[in-house]
Image (spheres, grey):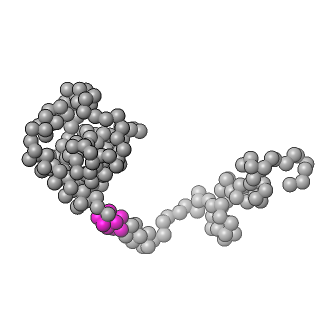
């Protein structure tokens, strides 16, 4: 069962530069919340077969992934049988390695990622160029001295710190001892 596989066929921690030494790489959900983990995008570059533990988190490239072509989906009910099937089929192993390599090249290579970010930034730039973002002057505030002089925005309650002298800021944050009451600043 899955417990036996995880106990017998896994390592406690493997540095990423050593991933290429393994036939199978298991992608698990993120450790902080059990959801997102950015580790998956790096697994295909090691030439191993990627096993993805079933989870609900999604990345932008997940829509392009095909189970059985780029990776194999596993959970506690099928992990053992999937590994048995893979171990018995060198042709399936080869198919998954090739599929994973093609996927990584097409969707996760440097040029592809740069193109994706440029397209996202282009859309945002176009949206911002068409109109100024709406700012509610009655609730907007700033600590910027130039904007305060223009009377475009009111000062924030937190502006007090930005208006202090360097010495007073040092005292305020505790770098210098505070002046005694009545003592010159």
The quadrant holding residue 35 is top left
Q: Is residue 64 left or right of residue 89?
A: right
Q: Is residue 5 left or right of residue 134?
A: left
Residue range highlighted in magenta? 111-120
Give percent across and percent down for residue 37: 35, 45
> Residue at image x 24%, y 33%?
9
Q: Nearer the viewer, residue 65 or 84?
A: 84
- Can you name the residue that lies furthest to the bottom here? 129
Q: Nearer the viewer, residue 63 or 128?
A: 63
Residue 116 covered by magenta stretch: yes
- Which corner quadrant holds the C terminus? bottom right
Give the vertical position of 112 relative to 170 (above or below): below
Q: Is residue 53 left or right of residue 134?
A: left
Give the vertical position of 89 relative to 139 (above or below): above
> Residue at image x 67%, y 53%?
158
> Residue at image x 38%, y 38%?
31
Q: Nearer the viewer, residue 175 or 16?
A: 16
Residue 116, can we see it? no
Give percent across and percent down for residue 39: 34, 47
- Which corner quadrant holds the N terminus? top left
Give percent across and percent down for residue 96: 15, 49
Looking at the magenta stretch, what is its main secondary structure? helix
The quadrant holding residue 150 is bottom right
Q: How many marks?
A: 0
Residue 154 covered by magenta stretch: no
Give percent across and percent down for residue 181: 88, 46
> Residue at image x 20%, y 46%?
49
Residue 49, can we see it? yes
């Amino acid at each position: 069962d899955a417990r036996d596989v995880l106990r017998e066929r896994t390592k406690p921690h493997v540095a990423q530069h050593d991933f290429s030494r393994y036939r199978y790489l298991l992608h698990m959900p993120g450790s902080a919340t059990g959801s997102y983990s950015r580790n998956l995008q790096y697994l295909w570059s090691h030439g191993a077969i990627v096993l993805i533990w079933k989870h609900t988190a999604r990345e932008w490239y997940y829509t392009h992934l095909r189970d059985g072509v780029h990776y194999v989906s596993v959970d506690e009910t099928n992990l053992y049988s999937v590994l048995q099937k893979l171990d018995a089929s060198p042709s399936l192993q080869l198919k998954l390695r090739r599929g994973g390599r093609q996927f990584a090249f097409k969707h996760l290579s440097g040029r592809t990622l740069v193109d994706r970010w440029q397209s996202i930034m282009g859309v945002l730039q176009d949206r911002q160029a068409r109109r100024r973002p709406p700012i509610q002057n009655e609730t907007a505030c700033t600590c910027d001295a130039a904007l305060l002089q223009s009377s475009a925005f009111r000062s924030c309650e937190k502006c007090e710190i930005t208006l202090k002298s360097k010495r007073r800021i040092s005292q305020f944050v505790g770098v210098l001892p505070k002046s005694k009451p009545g003592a010159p600043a």
